[in-house]
């Protein structure tokens, strides 16, 4: 079957359920586990915004024009502290109002280290799944993206804001991490004006990914360098497909790539 890749859709279950969109239908990726998949890129990238063909993908699946103009590719996506939605400013005011001038949360996620992150409240727990987090806790709830970004910046002195994707895929977990303890030690270091956004709820979420075998070494499949690949699907974590022979495929990174997917029963 032919499909244009996009971020996998997820459902927070035990284990997490993954699906891909195929012409309005959805294919369960969990049901493909232990099967041999062949992925062949046909050389085409279709911009996810304007649907025109593009030679190169910018950001996550945009053509260059859309990358520099689309609200989905604004700098405040990666750097929430730059968001101006609460001031009524941005590339697209309607988009900013609907997506960024909305309640956001700041969270801690644990894998091999503790990471701080920001997401729109309605993106919980999708965002955590996409990052392949082992455990998470909500730290704070703010009325808009900007304030969540300011909080995150204040915590960057203590925690990384990047996921170490290699450790994540090898399933390296530091089980001594206590997120509840981390949460309250954060509160102590924050300036008073930000402490008001802290949440009382100490629920710790644990995520279970449908993976039977984690790689020990990691080889990444990049369709720009290798346009055809075949392997047995052994797991799904974050936005990655994990194959036998230590190969991992970042689906999100290949957003807008048109591929042929062949499944050997
Ligand atoms: Zn475009
Ligand atoms: Zn924004």
Image: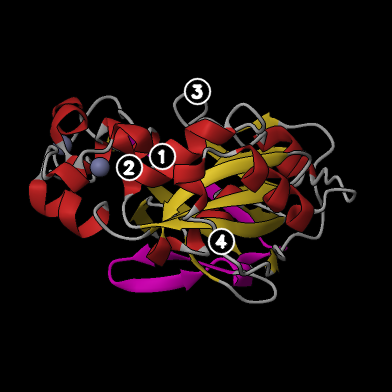
User: Foreground: 11 or 18?
Assistant: 11
Q: Label 4, secondary structure: give it.
A: strand
The CA distance from mark 4 to mark 1 is: 42 Å
Mark 1 → mark 3, Cα distance in angstroms: 36 Å
Q: Name the residue under label 4.
A: 263
Label 1 sits on residue = 149
Q: How far apart are marks 2 and 3 (CA)?
A: 38 Å
Q: Is mark 3 on a helix, strand or loop?
A: loop
The earlier-in-sequence mark between 1 and 3 is 1
For residue 66, side relative to residue 26 (left or right): left
Q: Main secondary structure of the magenta part?
A: strand
Q: In this view of the protein, which residue sits in the foreground, 99 or 34?
A: 99
Up-down relation of residue 68 to residue 117 (above or below):
above
> Mark 2 or mark 3, which has the lower sequence index?
2
Q: Is mark 2 within 8 Å of ligand 2?
A: yes
**Left or right of 190 on screen, residue 14:** right
Judged by depth in the image, the label closer to the viewer, 2 or 3, is: 2
Query: Which is closer to the viewer, label 4 or label 1?
Result: 1
Q: Which residue: 72% across, 55% down?
A: 134
Eye-nearest disc, 2 or 4: 2
Q: Are marks 1 and 2 in contact (CB under 8 Å)?
A: yes
Residue labelled with disc 3: 225
What residue range appears in magenta? 17-43
Question: What's the image's color scheme?
Answer: secondary structure
Task: Say which residue appears at 27% left-offset and 51% top-offset.
Answer: 100
Viewer-closest of 241 and 201? 201
Label 1 with label 3: CB-CB less than 8 Å: no
């Amino acid at each position: 079957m032919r499909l244009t890749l996009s971020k996998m859709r997820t459902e927070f279950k035990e284990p997490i359920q993954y699906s891909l969109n195929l012409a309005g239908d959805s294919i369960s990726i969990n049901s493909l586990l232990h099967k041999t998949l062949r992925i062949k890129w046909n050389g085409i990238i279709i911009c996810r915004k304007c649907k025109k063909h593009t030679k190169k993908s910018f950001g996550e699946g945009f053509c260059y024009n859309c990358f520099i103009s689309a609200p989905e590719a604004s700098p405040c996506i990666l750097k929430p502290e730059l968001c101006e939605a609460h001031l009524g400013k941005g590339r697209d005011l309607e988009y900013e109002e609907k997506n960024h001038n909305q309640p956001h949360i700041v969270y801690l996620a644990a894998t091999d280290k503790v990471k701080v992150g920001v997401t729109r409240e309605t993106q919980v727990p999708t965002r955590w799944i996409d990052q392949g987090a082992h455990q998470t806790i909500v730290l704070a709830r703010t009325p808009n993206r900007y304030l969540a970004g300011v909080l995150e910046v204040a915590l960057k002195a203590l925690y990384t804001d990047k996921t170490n994707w290699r450790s994540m895929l090898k399933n390296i977990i530091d089980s001594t991490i206590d997120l509840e303890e981390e949460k309250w030690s954060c509160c102590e270091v924050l300036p008073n004006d930000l402490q008001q956004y802290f949440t009382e709820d100490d629920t710790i979420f644990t995520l279970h990914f449908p993976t039977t075998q984690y790689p020990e070494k990691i080889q990444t499949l990049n369709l720009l360098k290798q346009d055809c690949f075949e392997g047995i699907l052994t797991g799904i974590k974050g936005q990655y497909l994990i194959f036998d022979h230590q190969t991992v495929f970042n689906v999100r990174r290949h957003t807008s790539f048109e591929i042929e997917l062949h499944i050997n029963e």
